[in-house]
């Protein structure tokens, strides 16, 4: 068994602060029961489960959070939010991580790369929804 | 005739014409009229869950303000804005609650809207058409309008996320909703319970992560099929598109032929009420529902 | 924009002049001038950013503020009079990508718009575009109509657009509104507008040579005869 020592300085604290500010949630309310990940319809597609991501945020591990695909797989169905026993708006935390990234790099999704035949048939609400979630 | 200020949402004018036209037709029969808000704008589809991004809340607040202004033109009306699309419903309901809780935010948004004479003063109530059917019209009246009971139709209600989530926007019990079941039974169809009745379809990921949607749709449809359903009933144009179109993709890949047609609940009402067939716009569906309806002699 | 004229003493008549700031530099100009004339009055010379001088071409978009007022105002420089305390600048060109499409291969629908301008789906309904439009077009409304596939409404609402580009500069969703407007008007013209029944008949008449004799007669006339004919032509009465 090996241990990883993590740094917990000002940079880490600032990151936690920013995520809490954008989401309006207290990240330390989470006691890691894992109900969010268990109920998530997309857990099998995520490289880090939802509660793992929250744990990284609690520890201020910005690099690990931003590298995970969890928040980009999340489709904002809010199942985690309504089930959290600590009444954390978990989906809002996912949104906060997305927004944190989009405020720096506004185009997570390259609109110009969407094939024309896809644009030709997609319902407009799919485009509005994804642009609102994946572009800044 | 009761008149409602009605917010269609973008998709009801494009991919989901059958949803809108059937809903307007059946509501007339039920002595209620859905009157479209003039010059409405897109509500934004998905609500923002940030605390500080007011820009993304302008659109839904503007919809509420325009709906309020629209009430002056209506007769025998209440302060309800009625939606059909469940995503619009949830976005508008959430923002309506949010501005109630945060009057400062509303003031900032109103500062942007006042030049257009479209300020909002938290005096509208957002209602999904299903809520109107259940609470204002009642299933008894619906049952009495049925001329062609949907016998043989085993329809599994698929609520999707946005009719029931979050707490602020739910139209029924979050874990055990019954409104679609009750409606289906009052039309003479059999409602088939599926445990995946609100399992997310993948939503807007259809744009750039189609595989996610494909996986979800396969599970949702299979859960209904193994319980004996021969159709699905939905209230969300994006769920409808995803389930309908992804089944087609799966069919083409695997050669299976037992896909379930996807109906908007209002289409089933229109069929049972004996409305004309054209308003259903079945030609827009990938899995043609007319094949099943012919088999069941419902056409 | 070479020589800047200094204002001589006898041109300075207090009641007649207003003080304006052009790109931060203060000038006194006659109050009876348009913004464009005033800029020329103080010595600017337009090689770009001016066109018809009649409010139609949209080349002379101007942005200004007034003292003690946070609002951004916009105008066509050839159509707007100077006002005391204007801070102004010209926007001679607005960069916006215009995709190439073949109008004959499209369908008049929301998807035709979204195919070439997917960014339309990013509209936040903030209405900044409508607020700056010097033509008072409800720009946001026509963008929303395009998104909703209501091409006829969008074409009608955008009809007065002069493509000045001020909306494009203000849009937080980075939509090139005036190019969208052009596409919806083309879709409207090609697919929705009814072809008048008499148009075909008229074209056939012309093809069949209804004017041939008239032209032959005109070409045979001398200069004096032509002038005489012009003077005696049928005139619309007022």
Image (cartoon, coloured by chain):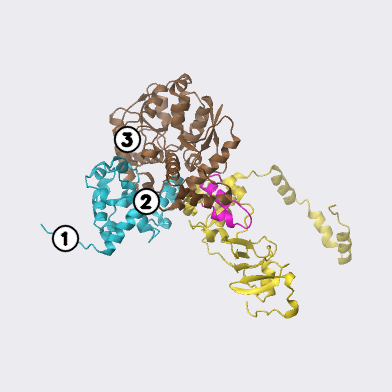
Q: Colour of chain C?
A: yellow
On the image, numbered disc 3 is attached to which residue?
B221
| Left or right for B76, reference A96 | right
Q: Is residue C144 above or below residue A18?
A: above
| Left or right for A129, reference A7 | right
Residue C145 falls within the magenta-colored stretch: yes
Residue at the (49%, 54%) spot, across then down: C117
Could you say where residue C50 lies in the image, as x and y percent from the top left?
A: 65, 68
On the image, numbered disc 1 is attached to which residue?
A4
The mark tally for this picture is 3
| Residue A125 seen anywhere in this rendered image of the structure | yes
Quadrant placement of the N terminus of chain B: top right
CB-based contact (under 8 Å), mark 2 and mark 1: no
On the image, numbered disc 2 is attached to which residue?
B208
Residue at the (36%, 34%) spot, across then down: B158
Q: Which residues are magenta?
A: C126-150
Marking on residue B183: none
* CA distance for labels 1 and 3: 44 Å
* CA distance for labels 3 and 2: 22 Å
Chain in brown in the render: B
Q: Chain of mark 1?
A: A
Could you say where residue B125 lies in the image, as x and y percent from the top left?
A: 48, 37
Q: Chain of mark 3?
A: B
Residue C132 falls within the magenta-colored stretch: yes
């Amino acid at each position: 068994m090996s241990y990883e020592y993590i740094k917990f300085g000002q940079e880490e604290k600032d990151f936690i602060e920013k995520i809490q500010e954008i989401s309006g949630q207290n990240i330390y309310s989470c006691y890691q029961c894992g109900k969010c990940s268990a109920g998530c319809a997309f857990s099998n597609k995520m490289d880090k489960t939802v509660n793992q991501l929250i744990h990284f945020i609690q520890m201020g591990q910005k690099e690990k959070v931003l590298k995970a695909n969890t928040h980009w797989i999340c489709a904002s169905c809010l199942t985690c939010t309504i089930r959290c026993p600590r009444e954390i708006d978990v989906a809002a935390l996912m949104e906060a991580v997305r927004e944190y990234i989009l405020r720096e790099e506004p185009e997570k999704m390259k609109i110009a790369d969407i094939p024309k035949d896809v644009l030709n048939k997609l319902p407009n609400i799919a485009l509005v929804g994804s642009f609102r979630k994946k572009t800044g | 005739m009761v008149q409602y200020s009605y917010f269609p949402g973008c998709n009801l004018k494009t991919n989901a014409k059958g949803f809108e036209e059937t809903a307007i037709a059946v509501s007339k029969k039920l002595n209620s009229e859905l009157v479209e808000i003039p010059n409405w704008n897109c509500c934004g589809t998905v609500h923002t869950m940030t605390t500080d991004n007011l820009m993304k809340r302008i659109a839904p607040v503007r919809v509420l303000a325009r709906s309020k202004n629209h009430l002056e033109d209506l007769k025998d009306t209440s302060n309800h804005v009625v939606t059909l699309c469940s995503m619009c419903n949830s976005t508008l309901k959430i923002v309506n609650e949010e501005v109630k809780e945060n009057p400062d935010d509303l003031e900032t948004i109103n500062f942007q809207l006042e030049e257009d004479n479209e300020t909002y003063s938290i005096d509208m109530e957002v209602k999904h058409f299903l809520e109107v059917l259940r609470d204002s019209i009642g299933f008894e009246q619906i049952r009495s309008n049925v001329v062609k009971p949907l016998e043989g139709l085993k329809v599994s209600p698929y609520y999707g996320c946005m009719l029931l989530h979050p707490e602020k926007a739910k139209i029924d019990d979050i874990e055990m909703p019954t409104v679609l079941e009750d409606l289906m039974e009052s039309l003479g169809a059999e409602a088939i319970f599926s445990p995946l009745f609100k399992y997310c379809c993948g939503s807007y990921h259809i744009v750039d992560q189609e595989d996610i949607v494909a996986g979800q749709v396969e599970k949702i449809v299979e859960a209904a099929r193994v319980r004996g359903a021969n159709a699905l009933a939905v209230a969300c144009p994006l769920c409808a598109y995803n389930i309908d179109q992804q089944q087609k993709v799966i069919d083409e890949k695997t050669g299976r032929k037992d896909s379930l047609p996807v109906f908007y609940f209002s289409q089933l009402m229109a069929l049972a009420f004996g409305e004309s067939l054209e308003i259903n716009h079945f030609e827009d569906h990938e899995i043609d529902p007319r094949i099943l309806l012919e088999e069941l002699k419902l056409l | 924009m070479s020589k800047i004229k200094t204002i001589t003493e006898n041109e300075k008549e207090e009641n007649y002049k207003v003080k304006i700031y052009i790109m931060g530099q203060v000038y006194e100009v006659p109050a009876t001038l348009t913004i464009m004339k005033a800029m020329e009055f103080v010595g600017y010379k337009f090689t770009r950013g001016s066109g018809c001088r009649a409010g139609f071409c949209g080349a002379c978009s101007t942005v200004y503020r007034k003292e003690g007022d946070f609002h951004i105002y916009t105008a066509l420089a050839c159509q707007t009079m100077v006002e005391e305390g204007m801070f102004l600048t010209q926007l001679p060109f607005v960069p916006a990508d215009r995709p190439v499409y073949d109008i004959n291969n499209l369908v008049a629908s929301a998807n035709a718009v979204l195919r070439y301008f997917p960014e339309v789906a990013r509209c936040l309904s903030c209405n900044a575009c409508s607020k700056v439009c010097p033509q008072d077009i409800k720009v946001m409304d026509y963008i929303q109509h395009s998104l909703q596939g209501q091409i006829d409404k969008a074409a009608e609402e955008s009809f007065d657009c002069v493509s000045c580009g001020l909306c494009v500069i203000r849009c937080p969703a980075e939509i090139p509104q005036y190019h969208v407007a052009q596409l919806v008007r083309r879709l409207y013209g090609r697919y929705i507008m009814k072809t008048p029944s008499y148009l075909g008949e008229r074209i056939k008449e012309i093809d069949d040579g209804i004017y041939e004799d008239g032209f032959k007669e005109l070409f045979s006339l001398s200069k004096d005869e032509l002038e005489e004919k012009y003077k005696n032509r049928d005139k619309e009465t007022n």
